[in-house]
Image: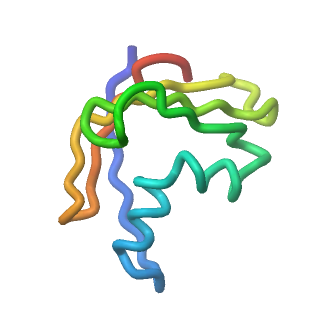
Amino acid sequence: MVAGSYTVEIESSVEAKRLWNATVKDSHNIFPKIAPGIVAGITILQGDGGVGTIRQIDFTAANKEFSYVKERVDKVDEDNFSYTYSHVEGG
């Protein structure tokens, strides 16, 4: 197993809370619509989106390396628009 981390900061004309809601809280609905050639679907397997939530991201055949990945949400800090997750299977 490989352990690592990354941090992403972006500048956007979209209000931070709106961007947070779209890319984190509602990503299971948004990502398959904005990237249908890559993301086939995202299913929440357990939880409500908060800490402990497990979700599966299914990829299209365009991703030749793996067909899915399961993630677990480890931390959520909505005030600072930050969250931490771990890959628990796939990928």
- Farthest residue, direction bottom: 13
Along the line of sight, which residue is nearer the eye, 5 or 13?
Answer: 13
- Farthest residue, direction front: 48
Q: Which corner quadrant of the image does residue 67 belong to?
A: top right
Residue 7 in the figure: left or right of residue 19:
left
Residue 64 in the figure: left or right of residue 76:
right
Q: Residue at x 32, y 35 (%)?
A: 73
Q: Residue at x 41, y 70 (%)?
A: 10
Q: Residue at x 36, y 75 (%)?
A: 16
Q: Quadrant of the N terminus?
A: top left
Query: Coloring scheme of the render?
Result: rainbow
From what the image shows, is residue 15 above or below residue 42? below
Q: Residue at x 69, y 58 (%)?
A: 34
From what the image shows, is residue 7 above or below residue 75? below
Along the line of sight, which residue is nearer the eye, 21 or 59?
Answer: 21
Q: Give how far across and how far down residue 38 sits, in percent.
A: 72, 43
Q: Give how far across and how far down residue 2 sits, in percent.
A: 38, 20
Q: Which corner quadrant of the image does residue 66 belong to?
A: top right
Q: Quadrant of the C terminus?
A: top right
From what the image shows, is residue 22 above or below residue 60? below
Along the line of sight, which residue is nearer the eye, 50 or 59?
Answer: 50
Q: Give how far across and how far down residue 74 sits, in percent.
A: 25, 35
Q: How many numbered circles are shown?
A: 0
Q: Give how far across and how far down residue 57 sits, in percent.
A: 57, 33
